[in-house]
Amino acid sequence: MNHRFHTTATLAAFAMAALPMAVQAQATEQSSRAASTEATLNPVVVTAALAPRTANESLSSVTVIDEATFRRQDPVSITDLFRGQPGVDVSSNGSFGKNSSVYIRGTGSSQNVLLIDGIRLRSATSGGAAWSYLDPRMFDRAEIVRGPRGSLYGADAIGGVIQLFTPQASEEGPQPRISVGGGSFNTQRLSAGISGREGGTSYSFAGSHFNTEGQPIRRDGDDKGYDNTSAMARVSHTFETGAEMGVLALRARGNNEYDGGENDFVQQVAGVYGELPLTDNWRSRLTLSEARDESDNIDDFGDSVFDTKVRTARWENTFTSGAHELIAGVEYSEDQVSGTTDYDETSRSNAAVFSQALLDFSPVTLQASLRFDDNESYGEEVTGSLGLGYDVDGHHTLRANYGTAFNAPTYNQLYFPGFGNPDLEAETSDTIEVGVRGQYSSWFWDAALYQTDIDNLIAGQGLQTNVPESRIRGAELAAGLQLDDWTLAAALTYTDPENRQTGNRLQNRATQSVRLDADRELGEWSFGGSWVAQNHRYRDAQNADRLSGYGLVNLRAGWQFAPLWSARVTLENALDQDYITTRSFDGADYINAGRAGFLSVHFGQ
């Protein structure tokens, strides 16, 4: 603007007038940036304690994958975000929709809980969740809580809980978003959505389609394709009284070709909830939900159908008194199984009561919970946990936790012909953990040591049996940094999962992993990459069938080429690593995709 001012006096007057506004704008921007950085490095977590707590207040080992990370990494599979996170391991029977297992602290998929907006999704027959059928573009946040949560969520929460969150409206008025892309293996991706707020009503709708010809999952095999069409709807309304009602529905449907056949699948969750402030210190919430896992298979062994349905009613009450909080509730759920396999039982119900106390005697905090489950098939179980935290100063928090959990045998483990064992006992566990977290203005670090003892671990590649005693020891170190235009994250994990009867390592578990994520913003451009490395694992309980370790490098770049418009390119497995994480029963390797590139164009916030 200098050409508009012709005298020194005018320039001086302009500078003096503009200086306060510039300082104020800079201060506002810095304050906003500092608040955003703090929210990213010390996010609010709801999964760990059924109540909102920042990461350093939760007294748990927790990792949050936020919306910015979802957008930057733009993964093809949801498990790509989890691989190598602290305490997390992933194995898969190939890429693009092929069966995947997520291990938390050395415990398998059936020993961990997956929630979608508070609704549990799992297969009652296999026990685990169908991770590979969840399109990551349907979600914008994930919370990974490590450690037992049986006293809060019931069966299966031995290793931890992962909760995925669908997008919520953050602004008034409609906010549309569209994404189109594709890449290697003749892959196409399309997604669109709209969200917003109108008065007390919040809404979010989205749909996506993914299709690929895929790649061979056995060496010298044929390409195995995969397609997935997903839709999500979420609507809630808050009344002037503070009461709230809402509904959620998420459905994924498609076809997956695998070794020896193909299947048509459906993954679905639906729920309705109402929350009412009964007094100033008492809120009551009732949630009714249903989750479905359906699979129609055509393979070398003939046609088969596996359909499972889990219906749940949960009533939760939260009482507050100053800084203290008490949560108490009841839960009733029913599993139903149908299909071509003749199971000895096709349904079972579970009734539970639970409570949790969150007590704040700053600088000391206490979290205690207790749950009683009465299951139609395996009887009664009592689980509990106790956590103690101490704020050393404004930046460091010490924590210690003890918790118990259990895992009920699945229908397949109990009744599947030639595979099931009706005499199986439920798995039970005890876990002790100590940790410390350092929280600063632009970075954090978190370290934890733990030991989990499991009685009657269910294992076996053929007939299922109980392993009398197993022990899993581990150490985790996580760190994150946001400084200027840089966003950095690091995770180191050591796990020692041992069958105490034989002294061998539990199968399919790596013992060491590292993950490094680095991203930088350069004006309209952004660049980043991830490195994930793990050591070897064993396919069998005898530790004779060894699978080599691997290291993966993923690269990414983004360009904001116009307001609300951006383009992203990702290069997965940039070094074209030949790696496997599991083998078939006949000893053939399940190979994962080599180098793959994807380009996408996005419109919206």
Image (spheres, rainbow, N blue to C red):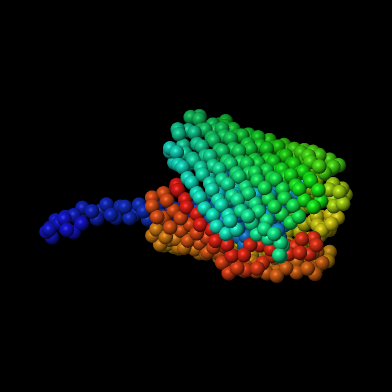
Apparent side of residue 263 relative to residue 210 in the rendered image (left or right)? right
Residue 399 in view, yes or no: no
Q: Residue 237 versus residue 581: which sits nearer the camera?
A: 581
Residue at figure coordinates x 41%, y 55% from the top left: 560
* Quarter of the picture holding the N terminus: bottom left
Residue at figure coordinates x 71%, y 54% from the top left: 258
Residue 270 in view, yes or no: yes
- Name above or below for residue 513 compared with residue 99: below
Q: Residue 262 versus residue 139: which sits nearer the camera?
A: 262
Residue 242 placed where, x, y %?
51, 32
Residue 354 placed where, x, y %?
69, 41
- Name above or below for residue 542 compared with residue 306: below
- Please state the total of marks drawn on the protein image: 0
Residue at figure coordinates x 71%, y 37% from the top left: 311
Apparent side of residue 421 relative to residue 394 in the rendered image (left or right)? right
Residue 517 placed where, x, y %?
53, 63
Residue at figure coordinates x 47%, y 52% from the top left: 601
Q: Residue 21 versus residue 436: which sits nearer the camera?
A: 21
Residue 218 placed where, x, y %?
72, 62
Apparent side of residue 438 relative to residue 270 in the rendered image (left or right)? left
